[in-house]
Amino acid sequence: MNSSVKVGATRETGRETGRSGLETQPVRQGIRQAAQLARQAEEHARDRQHAKGKNTARERLDLLFDKDTFEEVGRFAGGNIVGGKAGSAVITGFGMIYGRKVGVYAQDFSVRGGTLGQAEGEKICRLMDMAMRIKVPIVAMIDSGGARIQEGVAALTQYGRIFRKTCQASGFVPQISLILGPCAGGAVYCPALTDLIVMTKENSDMFVTGPDVVKAATGETISMDQLGGGYVHNTRSGVAHYLGEDEADAIDYARTVLAYLPSSSEVEPPTYAFASGHAERQAAKRLATIIPENDRQPYDVLDVIHAVVDNGELVQVHELFARSIVVGFACLEGHPVGIVANQPMVDAGSLDVDSSEKLARFVRLCDAFNLPVITLVDTPGYKPGSDQEHAGIIRRGAKVIYAYANAQVPMVTVVLRKAFGGSYIVMGSKSIGADLNYAWPSSQIAVLGAPGAVNIIHRRDLQKAKEAGQDVDALRQRLAEEYEATTVNANLSLEMGELDGMIDPEQTRQVLIGALDLLADKRRVKMNDKHHGNQPL
């Protein structure tokens, strides 16, 4: 910490001594005093932040970047040699994460509550412009009381500029927001526009209107944590993508995610040395025993994923939200991929309004940054019910279609068990744009499952049997078995070319690796001259 102050002071001294030798001694003395005041301010800030269970902005930067790689940009903008001057409520600069350059702006709550004024806004916009110019990711460390009231519209104007810069960077360079303190009012839309939001169990808060405003407007009494804490936004609203145990865990998650993503949309994701061995062969053998013989019995799709990907490692996104879908980052033979999978342990893996949005946004993220999408399908369809219809399952479910249909990265799909109705189409089917599709021998692909189909197709036969006093349940069972044998299987899809092969479970990893190798040279194609599509929102 102190070394950075000394370096800055030395540079400043160099500029001053060039003017006149007579000025050298007073300038050096002034710099020493400024450095001493800065150290005292930092120590005071550390004490205040630690008392709240929080780190200082500079301590957070040490956790984020590889050791001794952070280079501050615009430190003295606004004259902020000593904490409290214009611009000093935010630190901007660049550092290395796993050897790759990343830009950051970190709000400092110990300086004017981390509020955003004109100088702070200009520093952030300048940092974002530089990051886009050199094509590197941007990490935002948020810990702020919002716009600086004393500066009025000048402060609000800076938020508008940051919003626009964030939109310009969207899909061009990865953007991750770490919410490490309060984030309220219009300021919440800065992180909301980024790719991923990371919060912590303590101290992280996001809301448009705070508890006092809510009480005044509605009479409802609610705490900050209940209104917009990390747990709420990770489990209920879906605003946040990861809930860290503490600041160190949250920052480590951001570092990990960036290890899977490229520096910009113009380059491929990084690759890592990996050689399959005994562990991968043993994991492949386990795949044959994971799915139960009873197609109504659930299983954990994470067991399938862990047995397929390198080292069994999956970095989940939105882990606590819409849990009938699992999405996350993994590697296959050292190449990063995005994993999308239905989770039979939750609502049988059905799609609902929340899981549809979770899935769609993740596919869009992968497509923006050149990560192939691996889809593992086991779903009975869309979740039925008036609550789903009224919540907009048509509008929100259409986002999944839009994401897959517009994606141009390599896409490979494996049907593990069930793929019924519209969910079969939208979950990475070949007709919607997937490049290669496979199915396990146990897979069932049809418009409806056997029980539902029999009730519709043979409703008259069942009614006649009931009127004749026959055993309706036995008849229904026999008709369901016949339907399953003739219709509810992958054979028809195979014959139509909608599947590229029927594979044994233990072959899955090698088939996926081979498919991605085949698709390695796939390139984007501009379909027409439209400005952009009108995505269902």
Image (cartoon, grey):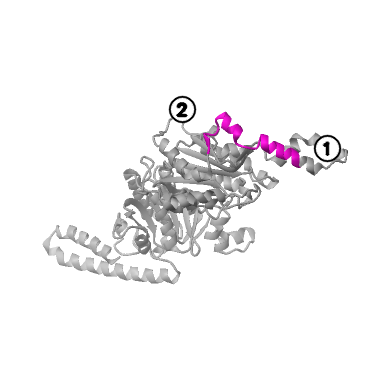
Residue 223: in sight, yes or no? Answer: yes
> Is residue 386 part of the magenta span, yes or no?
no
Which residue carries the number 1 mark?
463
Give the camera-side residue of 346 and 66: 346
Camera-nearest residue between 380 and 466: 466
The local crowd at label 2, few if under 14, some if 14 to 19, many if 20 or more residues have their Cα within 10 Å, is few
Quadrant in the picture for residue 371: top left
The residue positioned 31% from the left and 71% from the top of the image is: 40
Rounded to the nearest angstrom, the CA distance separating label 2 from label 1 is 54 Å
Quarter location, residue 498 = top right
Q: Which residues are magenta?
A: 477-502
Residue 81: x and y in percent read 29, 62
Residue 194 visible in the displayed image: no
Spot occupied by residue 185 in the image (x, y as percentages of width and height): 51, 55
The residue nearer to you, when weighing 184 against 250, is 250
**Disc ID at residue 528:** 2
Residue in the picture at 61% in, 58% down: 217
Q: What is the three-letter code of the residue carrying label 2?
A: Asn
Mark 1, residues whose alpha carbon is within 10 Å: few (<14), some, or many (≥20)?
some
Q: Amino acid at mark 1?
A: Gln
Marks 2,1: beta carbons within 8 A: no
* Left/right of residue 508 with respect to residue 94 in the rendered view: right
Q: Secondary structure at mark 2?
A: loop
Q: Looking at the picture, tell me which residue is in the foreground, 335 or 170.
A: 335
Nearest to N terminus: mark 2 or mark 1? 1
Q: Position of residue 130 (x, y in %)?
A: 32, 47
In the figure, residue 514 lies in which quadrant?
top left
- Compared to residue 351, the image places residue 34 above or below, namely below
Q: Main SS type for the magenta part?
A: helix
Q: Is residue 483 magenta?
A: yes
- Quarter in which the C terminus is drawn: top right
